Amino acid sequence: MAGNSFGKLFKLTTFGESHGKAIGGIIDGCPAGLSLDLEKIQDELNKRRPGQSAIVTQRKEPDTVEFLSGIFEGKTTGTPIGFVIQNADQKSKDYSHIKDTYRPSHADYTYDEKYGVRDYRGGGRSSARETASRVVGGAIAKQLVSEITFLTFTSSVGAIKMQKNYWEIDADLIEANPVRCPDPASAEKMEAYIREIRSQGDTIGGTVQCVIKNVPKGLGEPVFDKLHAELGKAMLSINAVKGFEFGSGFEGTKMKGSEHNDIFNPDGSTTTNLSGGIQGGISNGMDIYFNVAFKPVATLIQKQQTINSKGETVEMQGKGRHDPCVVPRAVPIVEAMAALVIADFMLQNRSSKIESNFLKNL
């Protein structure tokens, strides 16, 4: 299986399965001498872990990260940072009924077709549990680019949308409710709706918005390595993601060019920011903002028709502990992937400047 690494200079490789002994990762390319706040890294993991509220899966995982290498006396050494997160509360028997059955809209069928084998216990490698390792990598990336601010929150659940723009919200309210929506009135409706959906044995999707502030000008390349293209790839690699839009997104298609153009101020900033902080694939210094769409969780506690490995039509019903809405726990994952992208581009810019200065001095 290929494709387990993300990034060029700041690279994260993850390993492990949902019901294996542990999951973990290796971070390669983190500069030496970075003082790490390990409590902040654990805090990020705590936002993603299961069992944190009544509206998420009740699997009880402490998700305590253990660092194995690359850190000495609280600082990075420049060598690969290895870490593990032990799996503690697997209930593999909850999945024995799907050993030979393909769950609708899961990776069961495609894994079998591609590899000829699959770990049916919780989805194995295809499980969203893998994203815990991404959160660790993202938490370290955030400390590497500490001058940059990430603001990430739930912006909709089903048809219920937050009624405030990102510049109107109080960031302190994001963690004030289990939905992670900084608009209290909307958050209350979202939570009630998720509880209702759960009582029906069903699931619901939603969106996460991320805003990146204080991004320097010049991140990104103008052709294949556009900044927004890498952000899109990062977000679309997250389990259950079905869409990514930045800046004006699809709403921009309804506007005229005369309405959509961002007019420059004398200092290079713009009067509006429909470009979403990126023009020509390169950051322009304005806020970068984007939305990530998550589908409803595929596992339903309802009977559904499907097929088994013999191609026979069968009936199945989901068991075990599952999220009725993945969006609240996806907030730290989106932020982590955004931080990985920004940190990688920051290092690429630094490398390009060093190379440019070297060539000038030849």
Image (tube, rainbow, N blue to C red):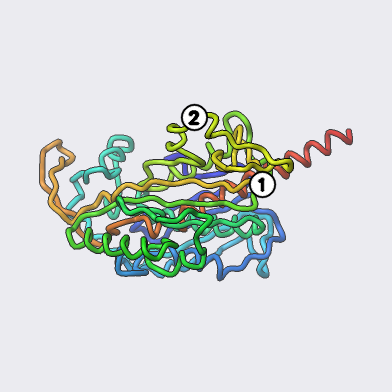
Foreground of the two, 221 or 187: 187
187 left or right of 34?
Answer: left
On the image, the x and y values in percent for residue 163 come to 40, 55
Task: Identify the secondary structure beneath mark 1.
Answer: helix
Residue type at mark 2: give it: Lys
Look at the picture and state if 53 lies above or below 352. Answer: below
Residue at point 27% right, 64% down? 192
Give the position of the N terminus as an image quadrant. Answer: top left
On the image, the x and y values in percent for residue 256 come to 49, 29
On the image, the x and y values in percent for residue 350 come to 73, 45
Q: Which residue is mark 2?
A: 256
Quadrant of res 2: top left
Task: Identify the secondary structure beneath mark 2.
Answer: loop
Number of the front mark, 2 or 1: 2
Residue 346 is labelled as: 1
Look at the picture and state if 290 lies above or below 178. Answer: above
